[in-house]
Image (cartoon, grey):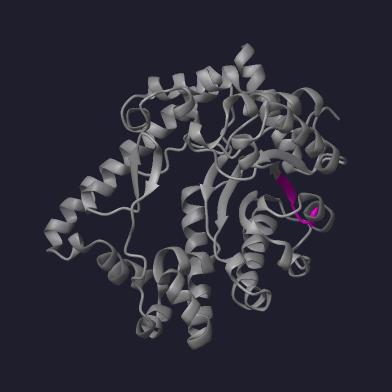
Amino acid sequence: MEIEKMYSEKFNRVKSVMLKQQPDRVPVVPNMETYVYRYANVNLKEALTNDVDLAVDAFKKTTKDIYLDAILGNSNIIPFKVMDLFGEGIYTITEKGLQIKGSHGMVLEPEDYPEFNKNVEDFLTNEIIRRKYPILNQSFEENKTLMIQALDGMNAFGSYNAKMNQRIKEEVGLPLLTKGSCYVASDIMLDYLRDFVGVSKDLRRHPNEFLEACNGIHKYVQKLLYESYPTPQDGFVVFSPLHLPTFLKPKDFEKFYFPFMKRYIEEVSVKRGYTILFFMENDWTPYLSILQDLPSNAKVIGLFEHGDLKTYKKQLGSKMVIMGGMPLNLLKTGTKEQCVDKAKQCLEDYAPDGNYIFSVDMVLMDTEDAKSENIIAAFDYIHENGKY
């Protein structure tokens, strides 16, 4: 019963901020992934694939030492056993965490645009998937057998995650906030179809085809979101990493990215009621004037990696909840006193009037990323002194 009460208090604290209400305290929600397992010194691969007890024990150990109101998820986002069936995957798992091992980044060519834009879903299903996974260039019966194995593997992966999440809730009392994920269409072009070089060329040589492709992708990725997470729940988020924007000039951002970002917010959050958490990578200062055109009646959180959060809050506070503030580099290289001073500054500069979630500006993956004594001291300071 005590754990249930603790879970409710923490969840409601975070939920109230998402709804633009003032909580009892500033929530502590670090961008923490596999650090949980590394800090607890458990075998990461076993914890994420074979041993739920090990995973739950890692969360118990970490939350015993480090104050957390919530984190985004359990870090088990890649169905490794399924990906092994296809002989490809952009991630591999090691004791250091999830690492990108490379991928066929450019699988859509400029000459494909006419057919791709006729029907994005059909082209992805019938053409792109075979380029991405050459093993699928086999007979129908062989593909059928492979797909049945993959579906069984996905069911097992889903069941494992559901069991882990339920036990973390019931035995640890820690909210895991992510219920779904979705991308802005232009990021799909970058991450999965054209790669950085291809996108850079397309914005100059094939701008209309690129925009048309993004229109089709926009509809498709939202369809996938609604199928995987059909009913929005306040207090939980759709996680959306934003990769392309800060590599664009403001005028290119305004033309090739912002329209899809804005439509995404309007359709997913304003019309359907989902809460979106944008991981806003790099420095967004050059785009602040453009972002003023975002709707003010959406449920959006902006986790900012770089830039002045005080300026972000002043200019974007009516558009989104501001999240971040604690530099990962300071947690890694600074003293405990310096980290506490920075936490104090976060409360002074960002917390007034609410609409703020304390977090780390970059992802905590490994114990080498930050000194544990610095994390403990900074997070404790926010929890103890961040009362409204």
Q: Position of residue 329 (x, y in %)?
A: 61, 42
Residue 317: say if magenta. yes
- Quadrant of res 133: bottom left
Q: Position of residue 182 (x, y in %)?
A: 52, 55
Which residues are the magenta region? 316-323
Relative to 108, 172 lies left or right: right
Observer-nearest of 343 and 225: 343
Q: Position of residue 26 (x, y in %)?
A: 77, 33
Instruction: Report if residue 357 is visible in the image.
Output: yes
| Residue in view at x 66 percent, y 42 percent | 327
- Quadrant of res 363: top right
Q: Which quadrant would the C terminus be assigned to in this image?
A: top right
Q: Is residue 347 above or below residue 385?
A: below
Q: Is residue 71 above or below residue 385?
A: below
Q: Is residue 93 above or below residue 126?
A: above
Relative to 59, 157 lies left or right: left
Residue 289: say if magenta. no
Instruction: Report if residue 212 is visible in the image.
Output: no
| Residue in view at x 77 percent, y 56 percent | 319
| Residue in view at x 76 percent, y 65 percent | 288
Specify the farthest residue to the bottom: 205
Q: Which quadrant would the N terminus be assigned to in this image?
A: top right
| Residue in view at x 34 percent, y 24 percent | 51
Q: Position of residue 195 (x, y in %)?
A: 42, 69
- Quadrant of res 237: top right
